[in-house]
Amino acid sequence: MKSAVIVFPGSNCDRDAFEAIKLITGEAPAMVWHRETELPDGVDFILVPGGFSYGDYLRSGAIAGRSPIMREVVSAADKGVAVMGVCNGFQTLTETGLLPGALLRNANLHFVCKEQPLEIANSNTRFTSAYSGTRDTVIPVAHHDGNYFADEATLDRLEGEGCVVFRYQGNPNGSARDIAGVTNEAGNVMGLMPHPERAVDQTHGGTGGRAVFESLLGSV
Amino acid sequence: MTEYAPDITPEIVAEHGLTDEEYGIILDRMGRAPNLVELGIFSVMWSEHCSYKSSRIHLSKFPTKNDRVICGPGENAGVIDIGDGQAAIFKMESHNHPSYIEPYQGAATGVGGILRDVFTMGARPVALMNALRFGSSDHHKTRSLVSGVVAGIGGYGNCVGVPTVGGETNFDTGYDGNILVNAMCVGLADQDKIFYSAARGAGDPILYVGSKTGRDGIHGATMASAEFDDDSDEKRPTVQVGDPFTEKLLIEACLELMATDVIVAIQDMGAAGLTSSSVEMAGKGGVGIELNMDDVPQREDAMTAYEMMLSESQERMLVILKPGKEAEAKAIFEKWELDAEVIGHTTDTGRMVLKHHGETVCDIPLDPLSEDAPKYDRPHTPTPRGKVMDAGDAPEPADYGEALLKLVGSPDLASKRWIWEQYDRHVMADTVDSSQSGGDAAIVRVHGTDKALAITTDCTPRYCKADPYEGGKQAVAEAYRNLSAVGATPIAITDCLNFGNPERPEIMGQFVGCVEGMAEACKDLDFPVVSGNVSLYNETRGAGIPPTPAVGGVGLIGDVTKHAGIGNAKDGDTLLLVGETVGHLGQSQYMRILHGNTDGAPPPVDLSVERWLGTWVRKAIERGVATAVHDLSDGGLAIGAAEMALGAKLGLKLGASPKGAATHGWLFGEDQGRYLIAAQGEALKLLLEKAEEHSVPVLQIGTFGGQRFQMGELIDVSLEDLRKAHEDWLPGYMAAPTLQTEAA
């Protein structure tokens, strides 16, 4: 599986994403700098990592969503390439319009970092198939702006179409309908606030995030 | 008659914090009266902060070497050998005064500064820690200070992407007017890629990189602005504003630069900014320096040379390059969209020459700035030693169960979840253990290896206040014990010595006592000091803070799968107490919290016992027979056992106290040199055998199981009640709607 990780100034989970992808797919991803205007040929999977792209100035993910490389990511997604945004990457994908909704400041206004229990709301996606038969998992969260918001009609549609893939058990940030991760209608773009790349080997204290990468590997 | 330059008055000299005698030395060394720029430079270089003039003669008592020390004090941070050609680089530093004035930015820039000290040397920062001391929880400012400091630490560390893995937080009325914010950073580097700050000769270009220079932080030096700035509306607060995004770019750009072969020396611009960085680099290399102030990237118009030299704008570095490498270096900073300008070069004159608008605005010999810096042996009066409190003279609690609940929910001992959940503890994906376990030390894997670093910060200020010497020993010994308790070999420490006004003999007595106690412990435990910082004048209205020599210890775990944790006890495990218990209640949390009594001597520390038991515990962990381990400190046996039970989510049945021991002394005494270990079956058998073989004092004192914490008829509380008492205090306190007043 050929992967790419986008690197913005201020990304800080890019190395963790690199290591997790390499560990699970056996192939190191290409690291693609934000100013690039082309993605590597034949890429199967693009990860937009967590961090504070461009310092999160203006609004989390707002500047990243308008960077040169994201135009290429959007066009790859339109062609069906798998795209996953984690944390700041999720915020960035909503800014590009690839995913609906927005991530607001956490309801209690504090940054939150914890081992987060999650319900697998849909294990029938490219990103979650390896969770099949599993109801829940634990993946750490670490964010200040993770409070998922969309209008009621959009939320109904997301739920109706199986686009809600992860839900919080014990909502840490005020997200609408406990949403932790969603896909687009086509099912090839996912955004999630928890960090699966931080839960892939035993020293992390849990491996709840492995199945995300295993699902992707199985889907190509 | 004393000589002054035309625009200088004796008042201006005094406002720069220079004594008549110090000014006399300047006149003598320069052969003429200094102008304002020169006076400013002498003033900051000879300030307490930069020159350590009150502390230097005592700091030399610290041992600074062992087999693993690569670089001790004197550089930006200490460097130790962690095997395989790798090094750990670390330091702890205070940012106390700014954090009290503006808690968010004060704490944030404290984190920024300590990160720079570490990556300046070529290390990628991999862990942050912090040691925080706030005033009494009843003080009207405490809640907002906690809120601001925690948000500031998180705001900076979370953004730069370095995990904040541990620390400590205390509350004491002695810090009501002076909180302490001590931040520690640990980084990793290859031993052949460590960078130092000494220049090497004449003709090397000097590159300024990072943020532009503004007028922020200038008065951090000493002087009121009116005398040297006609635009009085341009006054800036003395607290600098941090930008963690720029810092993140600076880290990546500097590490990229360090991977090339262009650097002669590199130094961050911390306190006293451009002045101290350029003076130190030139001074260490025995060369001169010439800077053109017109080329310094500036954020504001019409800055004077004085302002530029004294500004403490954040996120800036100074690099001495090999000649001809300017373009290569600048290209890297351009990629990261950071300013990078050549602002001067090294010379062979031994002088610092500054040019501005075509004129020489400063020309001073460099040697006196460092060599002739004042050094004082200030008078010091030892703290009178208190009597050892006999457990028989200390009151028993009316209800042991209630006493336990009150202690686990008291400000110092309550869970700090509200704080550490605001810190990203997992970024970089190498965190093995952090504050979230409530364990003795954080554990961070060395990226790409099976090794790990263990990191802890420790100090018990009330012990130091009662007996500086024993308290100093205890701070180092507890760091040693905390590292041992997770299975790490203690290697070296950094320290942050926070005290009151050194011009008062009793404060200086506290300082000298603590330093000497620490030095003895460092020597006996082979646990030297490799870096550190001194913060004096932590006083408000004549009242100094409790002496607080915070210790940051670093140890090495050879195989990360062989470590112990506080929460690993299993159902049916026997609880073992390792070490001797006398029942020392003087200065205990029990006496302080339950009886409001802060009398008596602190528990004595036997360093040979610490070393012996620490080594024994580490061996047991290494062999895999001890996986659930906790050191005993604040609150004694009862609190340590409760923390293990809470960590394991298991109840615990404690046996009766040994015959002849006072029960409250047994449960709540804070005797040093003790550990708890939980084990069963073969492991238990082996532990008991090995203990007997080495004459290690071990008692079987309880059994894990069920969901209640019990001790005979004396204590019977549900684990849930214990958990609530432990967890609910801080969130409840922080959420309280009304501010309490000082009088209330």
Image (spheres, coloured by chain):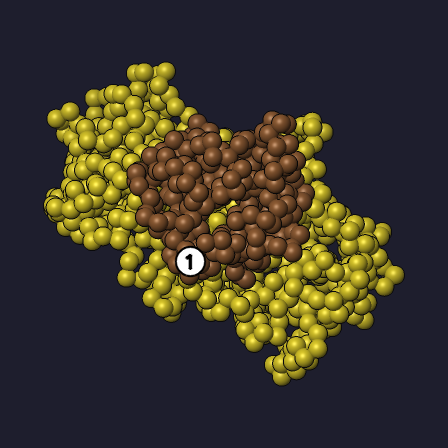
Chain colours: A brown, B yellow
Q: In the drawing, does residue A144 fall left or right of residue A159?
A: left
* Circle 1 chain: A
Instruction: Give how far across and how far down residue B38 sits, in percent.
Output: 23, 32
- In the rendered view, tell whether residue B343 sits above or below residue B715: above
Q: In the drawing, does residue B44 fall left or right of residue B241?
A: left
Q: In the drawing, does residue A197 fall left or right of residue B353?
A: right
- In the rendered view, tell whether residue B56 sits above or below residue B211: below
- In the rendered view, tell whether residue B624 sits above or below residue A111: below
Instruction: Give how far across and how far down residue B60 sits, in percent.
Output: 38, 57
**Would residue B499 be visible to someone looking at this image?**
no
Considering depth in this image, is B566 or B654 the residue closer to the camera?
Answer: B566
Q: Residues within 10 Å of mark 1 (few under 14, many from 20)?
A: some
- Residue at 50 percent across and 56 percent down: it is A218
Find numbered disc 1 in the image and state the secondary structure of the residue it sits on.
Answer: helix
**What amino acid type should be assigned to the residue bearing mark 1?**
Lys
**Would residue B647 be visible to someone looking at this image?**
yes
Q: Name the residue beneath numbered marker 1.
A: A22
- Residue at 41 percent across and 33 percent down: it is A65
Quadrant of residue A71 in the image? top left
Instruction: Give how far across and how far down residue B596 sits, in percent.
Output: 73, 45
**How many dots with numbers?**
1
- Quadrant of the image for the N terminus of chain B? top left
Considering depth in this image, is B631 or B247 the residue closer to the camera?
Answer: B247
- Quadrant of the image for the C terminus of chain B? top right
Instruction: Give how far across and how far down residue B656 sits, in percent.
Output: 81, 67
Considering depth in this image, is B394 or B1 the residue closer to the camera?
Answer: B394
